[in-house]
Every structure is written in C-alpha cells, then in structure tokens.
Image (cartoon, helix red, strand yellow):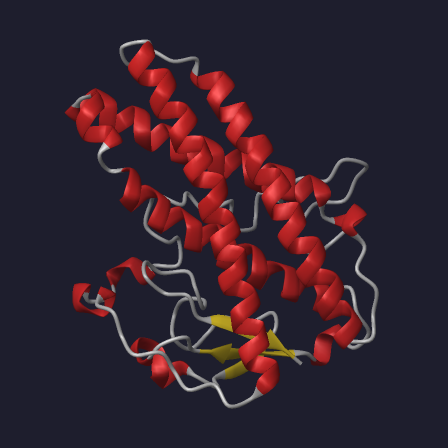
Amino acid sequence: TPMNVVDGDNPKPSVDTMPPQDPNGPPQDGSYREEPKALAKAKPMPLLHPSRKADLERQFRHIDLAQAALERHFSRLERSLKSKAGRADWTRWDRELADDLNGLLERIVELEGSLYALKLGGQFDMGRVVNYLRAMSEGAAEGINAKIREEITDDGLEAALGRRPQHVESARTGLGAGATRWAREEAARQSPGADRRVKIWIADTERHAEFDGDTVPVGELWPAGFAPGSVPGCACTQAIQ
C-alpha cells in the first residue's frame, strides 16, 4: 500500500493526507493568494535539457487529455440541462464524470509511473494505486458538478453554462498536471532508494522562472509554497531523480 493511503484490502486516501483537490476551488496549499498579475501569459522557458523537455511535453499532453474528457462531460451535461430546463440527475452525472476521470487518471498514472519507475530502477504496480485514483476521481467529479449546481442556483442556467471555458481551463491543468506529478512521486516511492530521491522544478514559462531548478527531497514541500502546476495558469512540472 502506498504511503498516502491506509493499510487494508481496499485502501482509500488516509484522513491525515490532503484530500482530492476541487479543480474549481482554490488550491489547498494556499497558493491562491498569488498576485492576480501572475495569471498573465508569459514567455515559454528555453528548455535545453532533452529529458526535462520531454517531461514537460508529456505533461502538456496529459493536460490535453484532461481537457478532452472535461469538454465531453460539459457537452453532455449542457445538452441534458437544456432539454430538462435545468433539472438533472446529479447522482448520475457525478458517477459518469467520476468514471471518465478515473479512466483518464489511470491512463496518465500508468504511463508516467511505469516510465519513471523504469528510469529509477523499479517496477510500477498499478494495483497499489487503483483505489486511491478512484477516490480522487470521485472527489474531483463531485467538486466540479457541485460548483456548476451552485452557479445554476445563484445565477441561472445560461450564466452557469457560459462559464464552461473557465471551468475547463482550471480543471484540465489541475487534473493533468496533478496526475503527472503524483505518478512520478509514486514511482519514486515504489523504486529502490526512495528516501534518497529528490524532485526538481521545471518551469514552463518565465512566470515561475525563479523556481526553475529548485530541488527538494521527494517528501518535502516546495520553497515556493505550492507545487508545480497547482495554481491557476501554471503548467510547470517536476522531475524526479
């Protein structure tokens, strides 16, 4: 059983670890307190190291996969809500989105975890993480749909549906980058010498250039106060070595 779940036959996220992040809400690490100007687009960072460039490009692809899954959900949900005058079986939509996100997260984690375990001299066992990923998917799905329901109640159906681009943009990075980052750390935990591994910040734009190359042990927090790819508009990533 990985370090972030309890022991047992059907492990779930432990109550003493950070629960699944609501992709529509502020990051739980306090990083939402960044200056609003930090959300402005910045120049891409020059990536001269082939391995780091590959790590970042894979994360970009994972973010694109998350966007496609979210767009499909919002399209189906929008058609249903418009045909039923705003009424919907939200239990069904939570379940269907959780299924979609679970497939997405398993795909990302298996690919990234296997690749990183190979790099680190280990083998990645998906059986140790499937229950955690399922719980993460359910939490994310419930958070996304709860935000939509709240906006329908407060502002009306059309206004809520009009915020689709913002919801997709926020959740796609949180899910794609979060799964990538988590898979790499889990691969390190499942590989030899886990206690000696470090994680290295790879900046995607000049916005977080000051953190590029920051290195800390895998189990420690980042000096920035938040993780790569965990704040709005950030698609930075991390390497493990």
Q: What residue is at 43 percent from the left and 13 percent from the top? A: 89
Above or below: residue 32 compared with residue 202: above
Looking at the rendered image, the quarter that the C terminus falls into is bottom right
> Residue 218 is drawn in which quadrant?
bottom right
Report the front residue among 140 and 40.
Answer: 40
Q: Quadrant of residue 55?
A: bottom right
Measured as percent of width and height from the top left, residue 231 is found at 35, 60
x and y percentages locating residue 123 in the rendered image:
83, 64
Please indicate, yes or no, whether residue 189 appears anywhere in the rendered image: no
* Depicted 2 relative to depicted 229: above or below: above
Q: Nearer the viewer, residue 179 or 28?
A: 179
Q: Percent position (x, y) of residue 18? A: 51, 50
Q: Position of residue 21 (x, y in %)?
A: 45, 47
> Who's the residue at 61% across and 82% down the image?
51
Is 148 displayed left or right of 125 in the figure? left
Left or right placement of residue 29 versus residue 135 in this view: left
Q: Is residue 93 above or below residue 223?
A: above
Look at 28% across and 45% down and name the residue there.
166
Q: Which residue is painted at 34% across and 24% down in the image?
A: 78
Q: Residue furthest bottom?
A: 48
